[in-house]
Image (cartoon, helix red, strand yellow):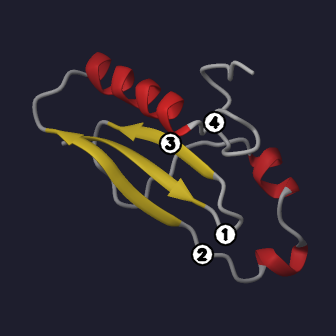
Amino acid sequence: MKVVYKVTYPNGKIYIGSDATDTITYVGTPSKELVAADFSREERMDLTMRKQIIWQSETATDVEMRKKEIELIREQRSNDPIVGYNRLPKHKK
């Protein structure tokens, strides 16, 4: 199963990623520095993130999955630094 997922952080910012194996523990690779900068030491002591599958397919190719991921990044504006942690594709201001 191929999936595109959305991770929501406690500050409301999101990260959208894809996973060709639907691994339950995989939450992507947002920039550690960007995420860390948004949370104090105290906030890091008890942090809850939410992962939602927002698209799935048993028949899509890796290329189709990646295309859908980019489409959803743009649609949900997770590449806008105010909204989320995705940095690609570049956000158009």
Say which element carries label 1.
loop
Q: CA distance from mark 3 to mark 4?
A: 7 Å
Do the numbered discs 3 and 2 sit on residues whose CB atoms are within 8 Å?
A: no
Say which element carries label 3.
strand
Do the numbered discs 4 and 1 sit on residues whose CB atoms are within 8 Å?
A: no
Do the numbered discs 1 and 3 sit on residues whose CB atoms are within 8 Å?
A: no
Residue 19 percent location from the top left of the image? 36, 40
For marks 3 and 2, the one nearer the N-term is 3
Q: Residues within 10 Å of mark 4 (few under 14, many from 20)?
A: many
Say which element carries label 4.
loop
Q: At 17% from the left edge and 26% from the top edge, which residue is drawn? A: 60
Residue 48 percent location from the top left of the image? 60, 75
For marks 4 and 2, the one nearer the N-term is 2
Q: CA distance from mark 1 to mark 2?
A: 6 Å
Task: Name the amino acid, label 2.
Answer: Thr
Q: At 51% from the left edge and 39% from the top edge, which residue is drawn? A: 76
Q: Residues within 10 Å of mark 3 (few under 14, many from 20)?
A: many
For marks 3 and 4, the one nearer the N-term is 3
Task: Name the amino acid, label 3.
Answer: Ile
**Could you tell whether 31 is left or right of 67 in the image?**
right
Q: Which residue is mark 2?
A: 48
Dividing the picture into quarters, in which one does residue 38 lie?
A: bottom right
Q: Which residue is mark 1?
A: 10
Q: Which residue is mark 4?
A: 86
Say which element carries label 2.
loop
Residue at the limit of the structure toward the left, as seen here: 59
Residue 91 percent location from the top left of the image? 68, 23
